[in-house]
C-alpha cells in the first residue's frame, strides 16, 4: 500500500517521507546539447526526461505557395527507452498512449508559442524518456518548456505541469481525504490522480488529464493542489532559466 | 487522399461575430444539446444513435475464448472504432488518423479502464474459458460531437445486449442457444457517459473563453480547444481529457464538470426510458401468452 | 416559356411513353440533362427525377436533385480560394474534387500591375468558363464581353450556407415563384427584411444583412425550406415568423 495508511494518519508522511503538498526534487539543466537549437534535461524525482528542439525550420512543402499555413507546425515525438521502467519493455511508435501524449504536448504549445511569427515552418520537439517514476507527461511538458526557452522561440508564458492525487479511494466520499502533490509510480497505480498543466502563475489550465475514477467532490481539492504545485514548478524552472541567462551575460561581458 | 476541407474566412469571421453576440449558427443556446434519438435493432446489442446529423451505429457481439495469461479471471472487452470514408471523404480506412486515435483512446479510458463492464463476470472457467465481448462502433455520418454520441451508443448497446446462457460442470462449459434458454444481460457496474466542451477565445472580454456544448462539424473545425469529461450519474468522474488547446480558468472548468454531471443524469434517464420501451415491444407476454391456442383471427 | 413539370416520375432505364414527349412541326426534339438517345428511336432517362417538357422550344429534360455538383459552362458558383500560383488562383468549387483555376487577371479592373489580393479561405462569386470531363474547371470573375464584373468577384462579410443542388437550381430560375414554387425570398423582402444574397449552383448560398441574427435567420429559413420541402403557404408562414424574430 503506497500510503501505508496506518502511519499516514499518524504522521501524515508518505512512504518516501514527503508531506501531502511537497514536490519531489525537481532539477533541470538547460542547453545540454550544443548541437540542437534548444535542449534540456529534467528530473522530477526519479523520472528523467531529455528534450531537444529543432526549429523553426522550413517545411518541406510541395511547389506553389500553400496559402493555408500561416502559422508554424509543431511536431512532437516521444521515445521511451526500454530500460526506463521496472521491466524492460520496448514501446513501439504507434502506441496509442504515446500518440495521445504527443498530440497533447503539440496542442498545448501550439496555443502558447507565437506560431504566427513563423509561417510555413516546423518546430520539432524530440523527447527521450530515460527513467519513469510517475508524472511522465508532466515531466515531458516541463522539459519542453525549458528546451523551447533555450531555443529562443517566443512564447506567452511558461507551461508548467505536475500531478495531483487523492488519498480517498474512489467509492468513499471521505471528507477528510487529503489531496496529494506529485505522485510516483506506486502512488499512481493505486490512487486516483490527474495531470494538470497551467500557464505560468495564472490559474488558467492548459492541459488536464485524468484517467482514474474519483468522486466529483474530490476534484476541486486535487485541482487546487495541482495548480499550486504548478506555480512551485514555475518558480524552479524560472530560476534555472535565469541562472543560464546570467551566465550568458557574464560570458559575453568578458 | 483528399485533405480536410477548411472553413472559409467569411465563415470564420461570421462565427466569431455570432459568438460575441451570444448566437450560435443553428439557433441553439450555448449549453443546449441537439435532439438525441436512440433506436435499437431487432437483434440484441444493436443501437443506433442520432445527435443532429451525426449518426452512430454500434454492434455488440460475444464469443467464448481463452483469457490473457496474466489475467486468468477477467474476460475480454474490446471497442473498435473505424472512421471510414463513409463518415467523411478525407478519412482513410487503413491509416488511423489523429482524431480516430483520440476517439478510440477516450472511449477506451471511459469504458474499459473504468470497468463499466464487469470483466470478472465474463469469466466461465478461470484460466481457460472466458467471454470476449466486442463493441464495433460504426460512424455513419460526422456532424460533430462524435465522442458523446459514440459513448451513448456503446453503453446503450451494452445494456441492450443479451449473451447466451451458460452452465459449467468442472472443465466443460455448455453454451445454450437462444431457443434452449433465454439469453442473459451483461453485468454493467455503472454507466459513464461523456460530455464534450469546445472552447473559443472571447473577443468581448480579454482572457475569457467561450464554452459551447455539442458542437457541429463547423464549430469543431473553428474551435481552439476542447475537453471531454466522462462521469456517471452518481457523480463519479471516470476521466477528464483536456489535451492541450486554449487554456481555461480552473474555476470555469469546475463549472463545466457540474454541467456535465447534470447532462449525464438526463442522458441516463433517456436511455433507460428507451430501453424500457424496447423491452415492452419485445415482450410478447410471459409463458401463459406463449401457450395460448387462440389465433389472432 | 411554357415549360411544364409533369407528374411523371422516371427512373433510369424507364421506357418513356411517346405521348409524354412534346412534338413540333418544325423544330427537332431537344434532349436536356438526364436523358439519353439510343438510335434509332429510343429515349431513356439516366437519372431518377421528374420529367419536364417545354412545348415552345420542343425540349424535354429530367429535373433531378443530385448529390455532387458537376461543373458546367456558364454556371454561377461560389468558390473558396485555396492556393495561388503565378498568375492564377486555385479555388475549390466542390469539396474533395480537383480545384478550379481562376486567372488573376479576370477580375474587374485588374491589370498586370494591380492584381486582386485574395487570401486563403476568401469567397468569390464566379462563372464557370471551361468545364469538361478531361480538364480541371476554369472560372472567371468578370464578364468576357463587357469587361465588367456584374456582381461577380470577392464576397466580403456575410455567411455561406449549404443547400441541396435542386434548391440552388430553383433559386436561380428566372421565375422562381411559378416554376420553382419558391416564395420564401420574396416574402422575406416583402416583410421588410433587408439582405443581400448570392446563390451558387454548387449548393452554396451567401447571405449578408446588417445584423448577425438576421443573417442566421435568413440562411436557416432557406435551409429549412430545402430540407423540409415546404409548400408556398408554409413558406409564407415561415417568412412571417422570421421577420418577427429580426
Image: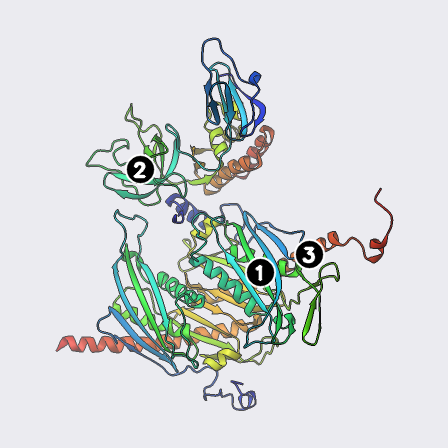
Residue at mark 1: B135
Distance from Cα at disc 2 to Cα at disc 1 = 46 Å
The chain letter under disc 3 is: B
Secondary structure, mark 2, is strand
Residue at mark 3: B275
Residue C125: image tag? none
Chosen colour scheme: rainbow
Q: Given the current orientation, which residue lies at the most extreme top position?
A: C25
Q: Are marks 3 and 2 in contact (CB under 8 Å)?
A: no
Q: Position of residue C141 (x, y in %)?
A: 32, 32
Mark 3 surroundings within 10 Å by alpha-carbon count, few (fewer than 14), some (14 through 19), many (20 or more): some
**In front of the other: label 1 or label 3?**
1
| Residue at 49% in and 11% down | C24
Q: Position of residue B261 (x, y in %)?
A: 59, 63
**In front of the other: label 2 or label 1?**
1
Between B262 and C226, the one lying in front of the other is C226
Between C144 and C191, the one lying in front of the other is C144
Q: In this picture, is C42 found above or below C97?
A: above
Distance from Cα at disc 3 to Cα at disc 2 = 54 Å
The reply to whether residue A99 is in sight is yes
The chain letter under disc 1 is: B
Amino acid at each position: 500500500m503506497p500510503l501505508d495508511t496506518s502511519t499516514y494518519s499518524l504522521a501524515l508522511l508518505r512512504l518516501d517521507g514527503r508531506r501531502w503538498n511537497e514536490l519531489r526534487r525537481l532539477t533541470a539543466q538547460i542547453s545540454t546539447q550544443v548541437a540542437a537549437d534548444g535542449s534540456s534535461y529534467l528530473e522530477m524525482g526519479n523520472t528523467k526526461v531529455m528534450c531537444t528542439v529543432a526549429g523553426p525550420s522550413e517545411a518541406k512543402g510541395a511547389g506553389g505557395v500553400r496559402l493555408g499555413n500561416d502559422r508554424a507546425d509543431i511536431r512532437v515525438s516521444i521515445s521511451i527507452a526500454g530500460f526506463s521502467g521496472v521491466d524492460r519493455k520496448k514501446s513501439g511508435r504507434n502506441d496509442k498512449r504515446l500518440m495521445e501524449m504527443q498530440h497533447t504536448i503539440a496542442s498545448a504549445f501550439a496555443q502558447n508559442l507565437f506560431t504566427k511569427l513563423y509561417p510555413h515552418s516546423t518546430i520539432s520537439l524530440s523527447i527521450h524518456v530515460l527513467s519513469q517514476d510517475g508524472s511522465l507527461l508532466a515531466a515531458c511538458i516541463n522539459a519542453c518548456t525549458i528546451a523551447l526557452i533555450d531555443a529562443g522561440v517566443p512564447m506567452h508564458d511558461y507551461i508548467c505541469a505536475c500531478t495531483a492525487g487523492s488519498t480517498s479511494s474512489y467509492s468513499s466520499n471521505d471528507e477528510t481525504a487529503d489531496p496529494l502533490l506529485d505522485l510516483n509510480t506506486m502512488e499512481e497505480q493505486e490512487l486516483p490522480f490527474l495531470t494538470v498543466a497551467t500557464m505560468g502563475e495564472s490559474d488558467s489550465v492548459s492541459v488536464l488529464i485524468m484517467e482514474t475514477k474519483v468522486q466529483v467532490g474530490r476534484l476541486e481539492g486535487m485541482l487546487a493542489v495541482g495548480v499550486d504545485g504548478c506555480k512551485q514548478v514555475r518558480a524552479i524552472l524560472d530560476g534555472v532559466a535565469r541562472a543560464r541567462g546570467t551566465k550568458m551575460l557574464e560570458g559575453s561581458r568578458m | 487522399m483528399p485533405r480536410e476541407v477548411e472553413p472559409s474566412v467569411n465563415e470564420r469571421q461570421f462565427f466569431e461575430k455570432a459568438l460575441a453576440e451570444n448566437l450560435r449558427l443553428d439557433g441553439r443556446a450555448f449549453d443546449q444539446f441537439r435532439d438525441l434519438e436512440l433506436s435499437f435493432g431487432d437483434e440484441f446489442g444493436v443501437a443506433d444513435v442520432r445527435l443532429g446529423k451525426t449518426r452512430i451505429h454500434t454492434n455488440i457481439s460475444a464469443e467464448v475464448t481463452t483469457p490473457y495469461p496474466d489475467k486468468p479471471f477477467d474476460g475480454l472487452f474490446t471497442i473498435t472504432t473505424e472512421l471510414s470514408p463513409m463518415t467523411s471523404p478525407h478519412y482513410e480506412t487503413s491509416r488511423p488518423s489523429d482524431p480516430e486515435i483520440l476517439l478510440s483512446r477516450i472511449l477506451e479510458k471511459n469504458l474499459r479502464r473504468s470497468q463499466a463492464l464487469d470483466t470478472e463476470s465474463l469469466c466461465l472457467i478461470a484460466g481457460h474459458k472466458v467471454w470476449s465481448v466486442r463493441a464495433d462502433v460504426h460512424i455513419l455520418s460526422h456532424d460533430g460531437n462524435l465522442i458523446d454520441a459514440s459513448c451513448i451508443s456503446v453503453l446503450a448497446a451494452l445494456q441492450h445486449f443479451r449473451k447466451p446462457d451458460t452452465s459449467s460442470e468442472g472443465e466443460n462449459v455448455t453454451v445454450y442457444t437462444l431457443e434452449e434458454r433465454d439469453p442473459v444481460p451483461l453485468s454493467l457496474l455503472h454507466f459513464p457517459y461523456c460530455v464534450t466542451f469546445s472552447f473559443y477565445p472571447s473577443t468581448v472580454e480579454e482572457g475569457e473563453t467561450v464554452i459551447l456544448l455539442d458542437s457541429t462539424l463547423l464549430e469543431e473545425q473553428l474551435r481552439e480547444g476542447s475537453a471531454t469529461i466522462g462521469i456517471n450519474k452518481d457523480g463519479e468522474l471516470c476521466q477528464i481529457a483536456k489535451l492541450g488547446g486554449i487554456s481555461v480558468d480552473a474555476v470555469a472548468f469546475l463549472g463545466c464538470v457540474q454541467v456535465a454531471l447534470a447532462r449525464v443524469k438526463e442522458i441516463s434517464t433517456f436511455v433507460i426510458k428507451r430501453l424500457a420501451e424496447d423491452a415492452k415491444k419485445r415482450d410478447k407476454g410471459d409463458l401463459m401468452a406463449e401457450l395460448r391456442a387462440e389465433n389472432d383471427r | 416559356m411554357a415549360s411544364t413539370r409533369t407528374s411523371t416520375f422516371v427512373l433510369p432505364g424507364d421506357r418513356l411513353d411517346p405521348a409524354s414527349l412534346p412534338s413540333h412541326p418544325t423544330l427537332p426534339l431537344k434532349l436536356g440533362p438526364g436523358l439519353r438517345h439510343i438510335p434509332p428511336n429510343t429515349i431513356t432517362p439516366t437519372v431518377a427525377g421528374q420529367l419536364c417538357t417545354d412545348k415552345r422550344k420542343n425540349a424535354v429534360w429530367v429535373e433531378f436533385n443530385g448529390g455532387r455538383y458537376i461543373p458546367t459552362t456558364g454556371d454561377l458558383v461560389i468558390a473558396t480560394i485555396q492556393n495561388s500560383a503565378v498568375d492564377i488562383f486555385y479555388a475549390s468549387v466542390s469539396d474533395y474534387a480537383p480545384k478550379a483555376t481562376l486567372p488573376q487577371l479576370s477580375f474587374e479592373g485588374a491589370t498586370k500591375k494591380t492584381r486582386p489580393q485574395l487570401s486563403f479561405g476568401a469567397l468569390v462569386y464566379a462563372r464557370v468558363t471551361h468545364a469538361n470531363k478531361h480538364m480541371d474547371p476554369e472560372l472567371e470573375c468578370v464578364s468576357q464581353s463587357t469587361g465588367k464584373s456584374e456582381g461577380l468577384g470577392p464576397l466580403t462579410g456575410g455567411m455561406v450556407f449549404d443547400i441541396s443542388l435542386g434548391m440552388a437550381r430553383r433559386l436561380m430560375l428566372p421565375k422562381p415563384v411559378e416554376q420553382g414554387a419558391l416564395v420564401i425570398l420574396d416574402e422575406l423582402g416583402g416583410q421588410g427584411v433587408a439582405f443581400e444574397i448570392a446563390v451558387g449552383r454548387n449548393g452554396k448560398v451567401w447571405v449578408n444583412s446588417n445584423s448577425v441574427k438576421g443573417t442566421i435567420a435568413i440562411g436557416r429559413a432557406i435551409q429549412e425550406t430545402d430540407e423540409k420541402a415546404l409548400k408556398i403557404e408554409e413558406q409564407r408562414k415561415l417568412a412571417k415568423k422570421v421577420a418577427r424574430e429580426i
